[in-house]
Amino acid sequence: MPATPAWPPKSLPRLYVAAPLGAGARVELDAAQSNYLGNVMRLKEGDQLLLFDGMSGEWLAAIAEAGKKRMTLLVDEPTRPQEAVPDLWLAFAPVKKGRVDWLVEKAVELGVARLLPVVSQRTIVDKLNLDRMRAHIIEAAEQCGRTALADIDEAMKLDSFLKVRDPARTLYFADETGGEAASKAFKPGPALVLVGPEGGFTPGEAAAIRSAPNALPVSLGPRILRAETAALAAVAAWMAAVGDWQ
C-alpha cells in the first residue's frame, strides 16, 4: 500500500508577509509579490501556498482573488510552529557586493539570529545597503524553510562595537594568529562570533578584541580563509557543537 503523501506538500511556493497570520485572515499582497505569484509561479485563484510572518510559524493559505497587480490570500491552518532560533549572532566585516550578499544569505540558511556589520581599519566596504540585505534575508528564509527572520544592524566601527556589546554574551574571535580549536571552544549559551576583513584585523585591533570581557580567540584551522568563508565556517562549527544540529 503506498504511503500517504505529506500535506501540505513541501513543493508549495513559500512567501514571507508582513501582515500577522491566523486562521481566516485575509492578506493583501503588494504588486511585487502579486507579480511573482501570478506571472512567475503562474498561480491562480484557488491555488495554495505557504506563508510565514516571522512571528507565528508557517501557515497554509489559498489565493482568494487574483488581479493583474494585486492578490488577496485567505489563510487556512498552521503547518509548522514558530522555530526556536539558536542564540547566535554573527559580526562580520563587510566585503564587496555579491560576496556580502552570499554571506548574508548563507548565514540565514545556517540559522543565525542577528547579523552585525563591523568596520575595521582594513575593511574595504564601510557601508551596506540594508534594504538590499533585508531582501536577501527574506529570500533566504523563504527558500530554506525558516519561520523567523534574522535581524541586521547598521554598520558600526570596531571600537564602538567593543564598547556597546553585552559582555554576558561570549565573544568568539576568529583569530588568524591562533586560538582554541573551534571544535572544542564553543560552549552552550548566548554567542557572538566575530570575523575580520580580508587581510585580517591589525595587531592593535586584535589585541583590543582579545582583551575584551568574555572574549575567546578561536582557530578555524590551518588554512587561510576568505572573510566570508571564515564567517560561515565559524557559524557551522558553532551550530554543530552547541547549536541546533544536535
Image: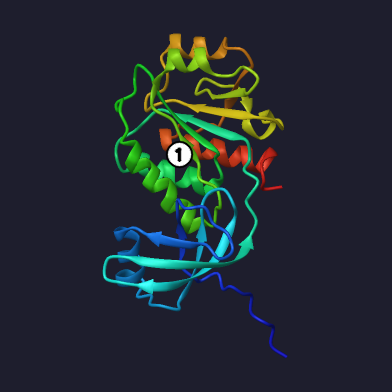
Q: Is residue 7 left or right of residue 163?
A: right
- The kind of residue tagged 1 is Thr
Q: Nearer the viewer, residue 215 or 132?
A: 132
- The residue carrying pointer 1 sits among few (fewer than 14), some (14 to 19) or many (20 or more) residues within 10 Å by Cα, namely some
Quadrant assignment for the N terminus: bottom right
Q: Position of residue 242 (x, y in %)?
A: 69, 38
Q: Position of residue 91 (x, y in %)?
A: 48, 28
Q: Nearer the viewer, residue 72 or 226?
A: 72
Residue located at (43% from left, 30% from top):
153
Q: Is residue 246 left or right of residue 235?
A: right
Q: Is residue 3 above or below residue 20?
A: below
> On the image, numbered disc 1 is attached to which residue?
229
Q: Is residue 36 above or below residue 93?
A: below
Residue located at (33% from left, 58% from top):
30
Residue located at (62% from left, 17% from top):
167
Q: Nearer the viewer, residue 202 or 145?
A: 145
Residue 157 visible in this rendered orientation of the protein: yes
Q: Position of residue 9 (x, y in %)?
A: 56, 73
Q: Is residue 147 above or below residue 96?
A: below
